[in-house]
Image: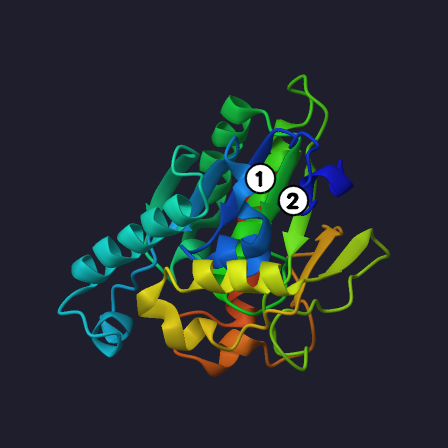
Amino acid sequence: MFQQATAAEDDASALPRTVLVFAHPDDETVALGSRLRRFGSAQFVHVTDGAPRNEQDSRWHGFDSWREYRVARQKELDRLLDEAGIASAGHECLEVPDQEASHDLAALTRRLAQLLLEHRPEVIFTHPFEGGHPDHDACAFAVHHAVKSNLGQGDAAPVVIEGAFYNAGAPAPGAFLPAPQPTVHCDFRLTESERQRKQARIDCFISQRETLRGFPLDWERFRIAPAYDFRKPPHPPPLLYDRYPWGMTGERFSQLAHEAEELLHGGQ
């Protein structure tokens, strides 16, 4: 299942039933931009709308308001799906404001659990829990706990696959922190044509040009998600988002995760 799900774009094998759960429009391209055409039958779920309400991002990117910025980011995602040849793929945005996905982890998990029951995926792509961005960590929490909540509903538990993003412990974006326990992983060195293809898809996100410029085009890395203890930071502080005014710290996230687990599972 892991090999089928992460196969190259020109691979002829069938894609397993797949749901992709990412925090922001463009995260799917960072994770697996060179192979997106394979995901025309998948369901894309973006947790946030990509537009922080504090207006700092929208003004920095040249927009008059976060509402204009949100519209622009949706158009960029539409452009990406069209460029990748998967404009008909299923897509849903949960409309959580950017930078606020971790504020109510229990509610986010319940929404996602319902979506997974509807789509019955065999594979879920999402973020690792690495302290890179609070919305990324919220997605990781929600996916893991939604899968746990749905156990016993009839289908086998889906394989959760992580793409590589960024964190304070890696020397550069596109690399994982060491997993808390051994897991299956694959590092794919992209060919020249794959790099060009991924760059063309990154270029769809005009508003994110400066942010995405820091991601390497040489590799796409995936691993089966390890088990995480979300009540503890993924690595010794400071986390990357401790350094930025994104409204969240590692200590606060750990507290929110503990509270959400009590609500969802009685702390089990």
Residue 240, x across and y down, in percent: 55, 77
Mark number displayed over residue 267: 2
133 is higher (above) or lower (below) than 6:
below
Quarter the C terminus occupies = top right
Residue drawn 53% across the image and 51% down it: 139
Q: Is residue 30 visible?
A: yes
Residue 252, x across and y down, in percent: 51, 67
In the rendered structure, which amino acid carries the disc numbered 2? Gly
117 is higher (above) or lower (below) than 227:
above
119 is higher (above) or lower (below) than 141:
above
Classify mark 2: residues with Cα within 10 Å, few (<14), some (14-19) or many (20+): few
Horizontal relation, residue 70 to residue 250: left or right: left
**Residue that mark 1 sits on:** 38
Relative depth, front residue between 163 and 36: 36
Q: Quadrant of residue 70?
A: bottom left
Residue drawn 38% across the image and 72% down it: 209
Residue 153, x across and y down, in percent: 64, 19
Q: Nearer the viewer, mark 1 or mark 2?
A: 1
Q: Are marks 1 and 2 in contact (CB under 8 Å)?
A: no
